[in-house]
Amino acid sequence: MLILAIESSCDDTAAAVLEDDRVLLSSVISSQFDVHARFGGIVPELASRRHIEAIWPVTAQALTEAGVELADIELIAATRGPGLVGSLLVGFTFAKTLALVRNIPCVDVDHMAGHLLSIRLEKEYPGFPYTALVVSGGNTSLFAVTDETTFEVLGRTRDDAAGEAFDKVAKLLGLGYPGGPAVSDMARHGDPEAFSFPRAWLDEESLDFSFSGLKTAVVNQVNRLRQQGQPLPVADICASFQEAVVEVLVEKAVRAARRTNSPALVLGGGVAANPRLRRLLGERCRREDIAFYAPSPVFCTDNAAMIGIAGYHRYLQGSVVTPDTDVYSRSPLN
Ligand code: KG4
């Protein structure tokens, strides 16, 4: 079955063409960094306007790169939520309309389901069940994944998402947007033990996360140094902050896998592109005898290929949308 997948939940307009859930024929992503960079964060209204401009060219490019015509497409899958409502509306309405005009089915996909299954875009991926850690700009959650459509939340952030914390620290240090890659690049030259930032373990058994205290600790440290008129050791701050985030993510992910007797741990979401997280989680899993899988960085950040995989299985399950199906900003999976 030839699938066209559409993703527009945040600041990337993406389209992909897949044959069932395994053969990825094309994946096109148009990012909006140039639009939002000077604001130091995403401006929702500007994001939706740019999606409107980009949605058709991106889709046309995905069809061309796949070597297929719109008339060949048999199913359309689109992100319904969670995300910015104005952004979601562009992609989801586009998908529903295209399906209606072509008289083919359209399935709605939860963005989180896409991240949970994105490892299936790789040659090597685990069988079910597995534990998944999804860490992005909007979410930091642990899931038990039983099959392609069954996901149970084991823990979630109680305040900021890890990616959001990376972005805020980058902004504070004047490193630009998006902050994650800038902070992790800087961190490579810094000492992770230079500053002892807090790790929020929460209750002893908790699989939830909290990053707002860490963010405040970094702000306070930076303010103290600025008041003392000292030059900011930016690389050390980045490395110490990153270490505090990564240590908690690694510990809780392994705890979740142990608790659910999962043979495998899967990473997903934009922060999963972080080299330090991938390395430390991989090493820890090896010691704990848990198989570790991380998608290549291009499938960690937002993309439509993962939406196609999740959409295919949702379709097999019998779920299709009607023209009045609406988007949502918060995930029922979370
Ligand atoms: O999944 P994603 O593309 O978008 C959503 O939030 O849904 O994730 C984007 C987030 C941003 O917060 C970005 O700063 C973060 O992922 N990120 C990183 C890295 N690359 C992207 N965070 C830490 N280290 C990275 N290398």
Image (spheres, rainbow, N blue to C red):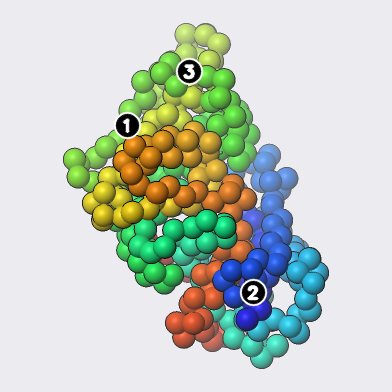
Query: Who comes first in sequence, dot 1 or dot 2?
Result: 2
Q: Residues within 10 Å of mark 3 (few under 14, many from 20)?
A: some
Mark 2 = which residue? 19
145 relative position to 233: left or right: left
Q: Quadrant where the N terminus lies?
A: bottom right
Q: Secondary structure at mark 2?
A: strand
Residue 320 in picture, x, y percent from top left: 51, 84
Frontmost of labels 3 and 2 is 2
Mark 3 = which residue? 191
Find residue 41 and report its image quarter: top right
Residue 251 in picture, x, y percent from top left: 32, 39
How far is mark 1 from mark 2, CA to CA? Answer: 44 Å
Q: Which mark is residue 156?
A: none
Q: Residues within 10 Å of mark 2 (few under 14, many from 20)?
A: some
Q: Which mark is residue 199?
A: 1
Residue 325 in view: no
Please report the residue visible at 69 percent of the width from the left and 52 percent of the height from the top. Answer: 31
Please report the residue visible at 56 percent of the width from the left and 63 percent of the height from the top. Answer: 306
